[in-house]
Image (tube, helix red, strand yellow):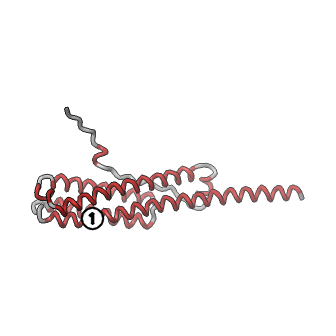
C-alpha cells in the first residue's frame, strides 16, 4: 500500500509539473499575441494615414506620379501582409512577410520624403506637415509595440525550447514563431559628423 501511495504521489507531481509547463506556454503565447495586437493597431493607423498624405501631395507632385504609385502599392502590399499576419501571429512565415512588406513601405516613404524635399510649397503645406508629423509619431509607436512583441516572442521561444518544456511544446504543437524585424533607414546609416 505504501508504494502505491508513493507512486500516485509521483505521478500526481509529474502531471502537475507538465500541466504547469503547458499553462506557461499558453500564457507566453497569449502575451506575444497581445503584443502583435498592439502592433496591428499602430500599423493600421500608419496605413490609414498614407492615402491621406498621398492625396494631399498629388496637387504638388504632378510630375512624380511614379513615386506616389510606389507608395500606394507598397502600402497595399503591407495592408495585405498585416491582415494575413493578424490571422495567426504565431506563424513565423507570415510575420517575416509582414516585416518585408513594411520595410518596402518604409523605403517607399523615404523616397517620397526625398522627392518632397524638392518642393518647398509642399513642405510648407499645413496639412502635409500635420500628416507627416502624425506618421512620424505612429512610426515611434510601431517601434515601441514591435519591441514589446519581440520581447514576448523571445520569452516564448526560450521557454518553449528548454527541456522538458520542448517535449510538452512538441506534444501540443506549440511552434516557434519569428520576431518582427522592421528596418529604419536611419538605423542603417552611419552618423555624419562635420566640423
- Where, quadrant-wise, is the C terminus in this rendering? top left
| Crowd class of label 1 (few under 14; some 14 to 19; many from 20; radius 10 Å) | some
Question: Residue 33: image x %, image y %?
Answer: 48, 62
Q: Farthest residue toward the right?
A: 1
Question: Where 20 falls versus 162 (above or below)?
Answer: below
Q: Please identify the quarter of the rendering in which residue 40 is found.
A: bottom left
Instruction: Look at the image and tell me in which quarter the N terminus lies.
Output: bottom right
Residue 37: x %, y % from top left: 43, 63
Count of numbered labels shown in the rendering = 1
> Viewed as shown, does residue 101 lie left or right of 29?
left
- SS class, disc 1: helix
- What percent of the width, then of the height, locates residue 99? 36, 56
Q: Position of residue 52 (x, y in %)?
A: 22, 66
Foreground residue among 172 and 75: 75
188 sits left or right of 16 in the view: left
Q: What residue appears at the point 36 percent right and 62 percent down from the top-left corner?
A: 42
| Left or right: 19 in relation to 3 | left
Q: Which residue is mark 1?
A: 49
Eyeballing the image, is 195 above or below 27?
above
Decide which of 31, 72 is in the foreground and name it.
Answer: 31
| Residue drawn where x is 35% and y is 52% of the image | 182
Please give the name of the residue rendered at 31% of the width and 57% of the height, measured from the top-left corner.
137
User: Which quarter of the picture shows residue 120?
Assistant: bottom left
Nearest the eye: 16 or 74: 16
Nearer to us in this view, 93 or 70: 70
Q: Is residue 161 above or below residue 61?
A: above
Q: Residue at x 27, y 64 (%)?
A: 49
- The image quarter containing residue 58 is bottom left
Amino acid at each position: 500500500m505504501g508504494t502505491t501511495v508513493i507512486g500516485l504521489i509521483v505521478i500526481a507531481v509529474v502531471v502537475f509539473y507538465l500541466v504547469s509547463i503547458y499553462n506557461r506556454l499558453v500564457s507566453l503565447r497569449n502575451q506575444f499575441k497581445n503584443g502583435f495586437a498592439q502592433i496591428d493597431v499602430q500599423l493600421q493607423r500608419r496605413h490609414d494615414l498614407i492615402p491621406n498624405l498621398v492625396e494631399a501631395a498629388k496637387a504638388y507632385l504632378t510630375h512624380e506620379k511614379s513615386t506616389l504609385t510606389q507608395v500606394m502599392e507598397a502600402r497595399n502590399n503591407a495592408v495585405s501582409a498585416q491582415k494575413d499576419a493578424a490571422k495567426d501571429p504565431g506563424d513565423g512565415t507570415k510575420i517575416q512577410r509582414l516585416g518585408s512588406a513594411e520595410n518596402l513601405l518604409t523605403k517607399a516613404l523615404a523616397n517620397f520624403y526625398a522627392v518632397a524635399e524638392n518642393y518647398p510649397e509642399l513642405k510648407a503645406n499645413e496639412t502635409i506637415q500635420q500628416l507627416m508629423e502624425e506618421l512620424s509619431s505612429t512610426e515611434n509607436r510601431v517601434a515601441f509595440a514591435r519591441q514589446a512583441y519581440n520581447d514576448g516572442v523571445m520569452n516564448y521561444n526560450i521557454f518553449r525550447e528548454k527541456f522538458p518544456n520542448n517535449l510538452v511544446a512538441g506534444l501540443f504543437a506549440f511552434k516557434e514563431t519569428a520576431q518582427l524585424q522592421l528596418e529604419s533607414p536611419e538605423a542603417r546609416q552611419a552618423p555624419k559628423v562635420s566640423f
